[in-house]
Image (cartoon, rainbow, N blue to C red):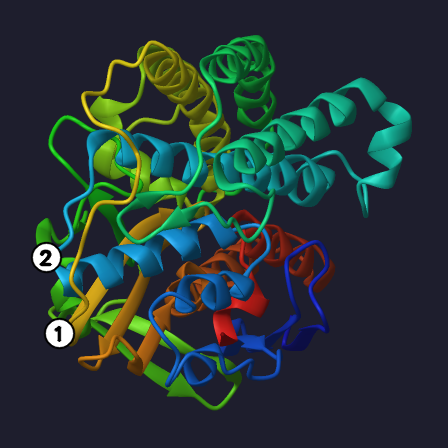
Amino acid sequence: MATASITVDHVARVEGHGDIRLTIEDGQVTTCEMSVVEPARLFESMVRGRSFEEVPYIASRVCGICSSSHVVTDIRAIESIFGVEVTDRTDALRELLVYGSFLQNHATHLFVFAAPDFLGHQSVFPLAETNPELLERALGLKALGNELCTLVGGRSIHPITAVVGGFTHEIDAAEYRRLADAMDEARGFALQAVDLFRDFDTIDVQTEGDLLAMVQPGSYPVCTSDTARFVRANYEFDCQNVEEEIEEYPQASSAAFLARARRTGKPYLTAALARVNASWNSLCQEARYAAAKAGLRPPEYNPFANNIAQAVELVDVLDRCAALCRRLAADEFADTSEPVAFTVRGGKGVGFTEAPRGALFHLLELNDEGRVERASIMTPTAQNIANLEADMRQLAEKMIAGGYDADLIRLEVEKLVRAYDPCLSCSVH
């Protein structure tokens, strides 16, 4: 392979539009680009001048799948400015809302986007013919996530019941118990999903970048901590200092900003794989056992393992949500989820959650009337692109050394992109 050019226009089975550009000369990769070709969507400009009450609902339109995460993240940013402390019951409801989007996203990604790669299909449609039960149960898991978001958030996407300080509405105890039973019933299929993705063959690539995830002692947090950890460099930072810790920068080949850790200058991966590495001991016992059985134990730096990590999270989420629903039904939380009182004031604050695809940061600056003077959103996909490019280069070079032809390299690079589960539309926000 003296000289070869690998081009993929509009990578299939991902959210949004992106192109792959690889140039190989004399066995070396001279060009490696994951180009985001989505137009700017200007959400950060759109909220400028708006009241804090409007911002979460505008920001949630960044993404349909992750809209719950965007709402909760914006609310947490506003609460950090106002000095609001919410009740444990409100935190529990927020977890359910975010976990609902995990179920929606992971089921869609694993079975509609990723699985065809390993089953020899170009799309999900042949899977519907060869294994209709598998696809039906996967879509049922996504539907359960939709229902959870609807019952907790008021709608399956762009939730409306979550507000600064609490929630405007809650379902009754019987609904919580019914949801818990549905979660228990779905867990068997989630365990099968771990086994399914364990059996898929992948190339051994070890990312050289770092991994970033929310951490909290004794917890597998998604929206209850302000602490982020770079796993390989082994240091933590408070999300309020995210601009001092993470550098966003432009690249001519992409409409999205790229990101790297300021202290080390390294790109990084933020995703289910990062969370499993960072909080392994806090996974529920069944999820941890399934992960170990599938060969996924920290430290795990193969980005293809993100597929298995998402399947493991399905098991964990179902177990966690069932327990939360039963606690809510039994009224085990001391306080209500009604919005707590607060005083509007100006200032700067950062909200931080784990969206299904990874760490999500919202930075807001409000004036004394509670109107937005500045907003910045750091989505998981935008943070991941630089690391994805580095992994693409490493994968291509390894395959060149192994004598693979251009068609096989193209296929494996596309698989790698999908393993990252990118939302390219969100990345330009």
Q: Residue at point 59% right, 55% down?
A: 64
Relative side of 399 to 230, left or right: right
- The residue shown at (21%, 23%) is 281
Question: Dot 2 corresponds to which residue?
Answer: 237
Q: Position of residue 36 (x, y in %)?
A: 57, 76
Mark 2 falls on what kind of element?
strand
Is residue 186 placed above or below 378 in the rendered structure? above
Taking depth in this image into account, of 207 and 318 the one nearest to the observer is: 318
Note whether residue 207 is visible.
no
Q: Is residue 183 above or below residue 369?
A: above
Q: Position of residue 86 (x, y in %)?
A: 20, 42
Q: Residues within 10 Å of mark 1 (few under 14, many from 20)?
A: few
Q: Position of residue 239 (x, y in %)?
A: 17, 59
Query: Quick check: 124 above or below 235?
Result: above
State the residue position of label 1.
244
Picture quadrant where residue 23 is located: bottom right
